[in-house]
Amino acid sequence: MSISPAESALYGALFSDPDIAEAFSDAATIRAMLDVERALARVQARLGIIPEDAAERIAFVAGSYEPDIAGVAAGTEKSGVPIIPLVEQLRAAVGGEAAAYVHWGATSQDIVDTGLVLRLRGVAGLLAGKIEQLSGLLGKLADEHRGTVMAARTRSQQALPTSFGLKAAGWLSPLIDHATRLDEVRPRLLAVQFGGAVGTLAALGARGVEVMEGMGEELGLAVPAGPWHVRRDNLAEFAGWLSIVTGSLGKMGQDVILLAQSEIAEVRPGAGGGSSTMPQKSNPVACEVMVTAAGLNASLISAMHQATIQEHERGGPGWQLEWLTLPQMAVATGAALNHAIAVIEMLEVDAARMRANLDESNGLILAEAATFALAEHMPRPQAQALVKEACSEVPQSGRTLMEILAGKTDAPVDWDTVADPANYLGSANELIDRILSRF
Amino acid sequence: MSISPAESALYGALFSDPDIAEAFSDAATIRAMLDVERALARVQARLGIIPEDAAERIAFVAGSYEPDIAGVAAGTEKSGVPIIPLVEQLRAAVGGEAAAYVHWGATSQDIVDTGLVLRLRGVAGLLAGKIEQLSGLLGKLADEHRGTVMAARTRSQQALPTSFGLKAAGWLSPLIDHATRLDEVRPRLLAVQFGGAVGTLAALGARGVEVMEGMGEELGLAVPAGPWHVRRDNLAEFAGWLSIVTGSLGKMGQDVILLAQSEIAEVRPGAGGGSSTMPQKSNPVACEVMVTAAGLNASLISAMHQATIQEHERGGPGWQLEWLTLPQMAVATGAALNHAIAVIEMLEVDAARMRANLDESNGLILAEAATFALAEHMPRPQAQALVKEACSEVPQSGRTLMEILAGKTDAPVDWDTVADPANYLGSANELIDRILSRF
Amino acid sequence: MSISPAESALYGALFSDPDIAEAFSDAATIRAMLDVERALARVQARLGIIPEDAAERIAFVAGSYEPDIAGVAAGTEKSGVPIIPLVEQLRAAVGGEAAAYVHWGATSQDIVDTGLVLRLRGVAGLLAGKIEQLSGLLGKLADEHRGTVMAARTRSQQALPTSFGLKAAGWLSPLIDHATRLDEVRPRLLAVQFGGAVGTLAALGARGVEVMEGMGEELGLAVPAGPWHVRRDNLAEFAGWLSIVTGSLGKMGQDVILLAQSEIAEVRPGAGGGSSTMPQKSNPVACEVMVTAAGLNASLISAMHQATIQEHERGGPGWQLEWLTLPQMAVATGAALNHAIAVIEMLEVDAARMRANLDESNGLILAEAATFALAEHMPRPQAQALVKEACSEVPQSGRTLMEILAGKTDAPVDWDTVADPANYLGSANELIDRILSRF
Amino acid sequence: MSISPAESALYGALFSDPDIAEAFSDAATIRAMLDVERALARVQARLGIIPEDAAERIAFVAGSYEPDIAGVAAGTEKSGVPIIPLVEQLRAAVGGEAAAYVHWGATSQDIVDTGLVLRLRGVAGLLAGKIEQLSGLLGKLADEHRGTVMAARTRSQQALPTSFGLKAAGWLSPLIDHATRLDEVRPRLLAVQFGGAVGTLAALGARGVEVMEGMGEELGLAVPAGPWHVRRDNLAEFAGWLSIVTGSLGKMGQDVILLAQSEIAEVRPGAGGGSSTMPQKSNPVACEVMVTAAGLNASLISAMHQATIQEHERGGPGWQLEWLTLPQMAVATGAALNHAIAVIEMLEVDAARMRANLDESNGLILAEAATFALAEHMPRPQAQALVKEACSEVPQSGRTLMEILAGKTDAPVDWDTVADPANYLGSANELIDRILSRF
């Protein structure tokens, strides 16, 4: 264990995603900030605000500059943000007259926040790719298991038949909307932050907005109406998206765990772990992490919403709270998606066991179907009464509901057909089609 | 106090919004469920699934039916949902053969969830209206106070000048996006839930999807790809929207509280309360509630995300958790918006005090402006050094920075112009324009 | 539904506890505040701070005074606390010279907070009583089911045998500590709040502390070192206690839900609800509410901890946040305890099914026991290898592990004894004894 | 930034505490688990359960064993816990017949949880030491500033005078209780976890409890009634304690931030950071981190309470959720305490400014004192009316309240004495004494 297991050599493989974690590494953080400084210089040179050769020098140096981390860290401890010591070092490396034009008219938060957004762009892309991959796997699973009949369970008890295909389509369905949501969130999230010391861009005279627009163009980011230094709804919204994604994965993981219980055993998550002392066990480790990530994000989302209250033109605690929570949330989401992909890829579905579990009720699970079948031949209340009476006899009799019903009435019902749960799936296939067609 | 102060006779006016609270009253809850049953009967008659006259009878009775609440409550205690006893009572009231066609092919959750959505439609409309009203007020405030110069404060300390107009525009800016977000959320949220007992619509044979579509049309709701009984991302997303809205209002409320502190006194929230023993006080009660609502929602959002993990084809605890939290969140949001409207409507802005507070630093707050002014007449490093030296003399001297600088250099700077913070607002007006133009 | 289902006529029976809810009613809130005013007058008269006859008059009137609620509410809306208008009304009712001595030297928060504590004393007592009742039931259950052998399940899979008695003892065990914890929390929680306007008790000259001590004696509350108006750790601590209690109940409810699943069916929560369309179902409604209460409190506890940050000598938003959350938490805890008591009282335990589920593994669950038995007759590694080999043959063979082992070795093991899970319960009974002895 | 800024080279100094972080390092985690395995072997040898020489060999090897981390990590990924691969490696290192006696009768969770508790013992000790150090500093501050008069502020506005000494005593007061609370929590938290595979200790026959007791003695840990593998109230309780501590520190940090605002400037947190562009600023970085830690813990505490619902005899997601949150909470608490110590050690208190801010109200802040003074010479209602009238004249007049009152009445009041806020501090010193005497 480490402070965060996601960063532990022991636990990292369970709880982290290396690519997403990399976006939050010190190296990537610094690189992104230097990229923003570089873009700033270029844009300002293009607009004639700083000398062309100063910008070239800054862009050249910043392009490959590797700061003295210990020095930056010392400055961060003092000032609360790494950009102040970083800019000092960068100025020294740039040297000459160009040094004065480094960070021209910008404030720490401009660089830190825009740098964050550059990294979140990559993170969003990675997550979108994983969602698409998982969606593809689930779509395939849904399609393949249209005919795999199983018990649907409501409030923990067998209710009526369904198909495993519809269950998989139900796991897929929210993911399709999550992709749409991310597309909606992106232009609000991936927007340049540029406001100068207090959001007026005063140090750039009348040219601040031009620079903000130029920055957007240079970095491929959206240009917002104004700086978002103290409106953090974009980050809270993205955090909410992360947590909704893990919520959907947590539901999937929980379902698989429940289906894999020893006594149910309808699926077997191939990625499961063993037990040293109990050879018959296969722990659903990957599914557990999916549920865990949902719980973690459902807790951390609270911090991200608390953090939207940032005072005046810069709020310290709210800003820091984002730093302490958003990276964890993104990494947990990536890890949960990875586990979900592995679980679905390796999932062993035991159709025979599903059918056997359904049959355990001796047809009680098809009481509704029997009522409907009978109601074609007698008044519905009479049909209901007959089925109710038969149902009460099932447990003691050892016979199935349909056998008992066949003995109680000569209505010309094809009891074999009624007894087959595959004939009582309603619109399952149509619903699968509808969901798949949206993907 | 009551379990929830929002429902207390004593505290309700502070923490509740009567119109939104009404949407969550027992009466409205029952009315919405009966409306769904009525729509169901009509649609099924139109599709030839149930007899036309049965549907007419059901629609007639359900249209004005007032159930025996105590009886419904007793059934709710037993079954966990009110719909089972409610349908029993409704069937008795409908009577005759039509009674059997009440709730045809539906399950409790279809009625409860679709009924919820019908009420949330009204709630969303009310909130959108309040956001628009508040946005209008803030837009006006921003426009009026373009020239009201004040200190911007970063990390709790005076930083540079800004205008109160830009501050108000900053409060407005997220609200504009919140309206957009609600438009995006609406079609996902305001969607019919119809899946039958387990989401297959089996009781309707092959006609379930037709009924679902008909329900959407009849009730003016979107028709989703499939039932959302166990994917609750739509509700979690809406809850996130509510909490982001209160987060923005909490920031606004916090800013006003800070500006209204005795020693700062730049604004006076007219809606403030008095103190029995301290006549000089005016408590910013309304602003406090805005912050409180943000804190409450930032906490409850965690429950709504936890609740997305609902097992199999119906999850009890997750569903119940939504009932216990979403109404509170909506009511808190409505109350916070009401308070925000009142605060902005009655806000007294003391421009003179703002200017006086700015002047307290004897020009130190304009050190950056002075540097820029000097840098037009000498190398920038030299300008910086001069300003730094002058800054260090300000505290002991009792003179202003510009007076000291004027004595240190004969550079032809117009020090009066530099000394006026109104001349160091950068792009403030342009940013206000950009924000107002999006509204 | 109502804003809080706990206050809804429809849902109240599920989510509320009438006695605890009563403690948070408007009437009880006002009554408690009047009791504090009465105690204040009596104490001050006893100390000679106010005239004896004034105190008598105040105590007499406050003893039965019923304020005009609408008037108090209107004042609450304005000032943010009900005590200001309440004191005005009380003064008018007291009349004469005595009127001036009402609320002498106190501030709103003294009355509101001490009034809250008076009510929490009752709430704590009610909860302690319920915990004791539940503990008694669980102790009896644990004792009765020492011999009821069942599968223990780790990470959702059958692991080794245990007894249902030990399981019940495991549910009991934390409750015993919760009772201890409450005893520790009580003196910190049930302490008079008395600080005057800002915590100095200035309005009482040098006699403030005497009055504070007198108030403690008069009301039977602890006397703290100083006023706790802006240190709220006592309330946060109590909220944490509530949430830990519901956490333990949630674990119990979740276990029962899992054991009651159709395919496992080892217990049947008698308090379960039915389903209109699926007669074979018995929803574990009460258990669900136990889990739900845990989820609600786990979310609201976050607000109570946020609320500990209260500014200077009185913080508005933090104080309000307590009002909006603590009552809900207490009521949810009471309701969860009620449900737990009902569930345990009516729990049907199916020992035969427990044994049948154990036997499903054909002895694999006893692989460890077999190894130990064999290891008495051969080196342990050899025993392990033999068992492992036998285990792998079980699934295809249709025979039990012990049958296979008996065929593989002539070691003089009494295989019937090994095959009986009741012989592999280790220290189960000793652990039950240890837990029961602490109760 | 890193996934957790506490582990970042850049941000670690702000958000981490090296000693506490070390307790959660991979190395310390493994070391603690090996210590538990070593203790287990020793105890079992002492009880004659395993051979003496095997135990000696195990204890010798485990005492300095350094596992192949990559190998352990690979096994962790598969099985979800590091102990399975670690035990395999340790067995190989021990070799011979002794190898079989490694981890005898234990399960993964016994080693992981007891190992955690060993490390939490150190963490609790470190935190207790910091609390004591901070308490000492605050006690000294309170004592020194008994005579430093300042404005008390309620709901963000100046209310009455208080002393900075009482304010500091108010910060100290909860810390004294936190130390007491930790003493109460310790025996419940620092308890051996030993239950074997499912909590029956079956693998040890009848001797499980003896071993559990021996483990407690060997490791210096409490011996609980039974294993706590699925009752996690001890960890949730400790997490609650951590969060209450940071809540108290957050209140202190927030107060200092508010007092250090430019316009108030009554204190200056010496540990504050600078600003690159605004030389007049001193950001209260350390105080911000104190508030941030409170917000983080107030959010994470929700996860720890969610995690108390652990299924049956081992719950995966709940257990994992603890791993992901508790270390962060402990580290944040340590960091917040460090910052608090630094802030208090270096705090500059500006008594003159405090007095000047008090005087800003021209005596309005002493209206209550004036009323009391007058009431000694006239009926109280008359005194109140006179003061109210005088108060209304203060703002326009430019004169102080006492000057105006002196002109309105010839009552023989010593107005100079009344005008001195130091004379209206009530029981401030007595309350400081009471708080200091509890320390």
Image (spheres, coloured by chain):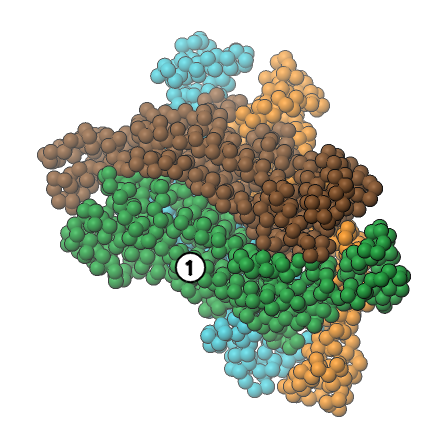
Chain colours: A brown, B green, C cyan, D orange
Residue B95 visible (yes or no): yes
Compared to residue D365, the image places residue C342 above or below, namely above
Query: Which residue is nearer to you in this view: A281 or B121?
Result: B121
Chain letter for mark 1: B
Secondary structure state at the residue bearing disc 1: helix
Where residue A330 sits: x, y (%)? Answer: 57, 39
**How many tags in the picture?**
1
Where does the C terminus of chain D fall, quadrant-wise? bottom right
Q: How many residues crowd around disc 1 within 10 Å: few (fewer than 14), some, or many (20 or more)?
A: few
The answer to which quarter of the image holds residue D280 is bottom right
Q: Nearer the viewer, residue A60 or C114?
A: A60
**Measuring 55% from the left and 81% from the top, which residue is drawn there?**
C91
- List x then y, in percent, for residue C420: 41, 23
Residue at 63% in and 12% down: D96
Quadrant (top left/top right/bottom left/bottom right) for the N terminus of chain D: top right
Residue at 58% x, 29% y: name it.
A13
Q: Report whether residue C248 is seen.
A: no
Q: Is residue C77 left or right of residue A197?
A: left
Image quarter for residue A349?
top left
- Badge 1 is on which residue? B125
Q: Residue at x 74, y 85 (%)?
A: D404
Where residue B430 appears, x then y in whole percent? 63, 59
Outermost residue toward the bottom in this view:
D410
In this picture, residue C301 sits left or right of residue D126: left
Observer-nearest of A41 and A118: A41
Measured along the vertical axis of the image, is residue A346 above or below residue D383? Answer: above
Left or right: where A107 falls relative to B27: right
Amino acid type shown at disc 1:
Gly
How far across and how far down the image is residue D169, in percent? 73, 60
Q: Is residue A204 above or below residue A54?
A: below
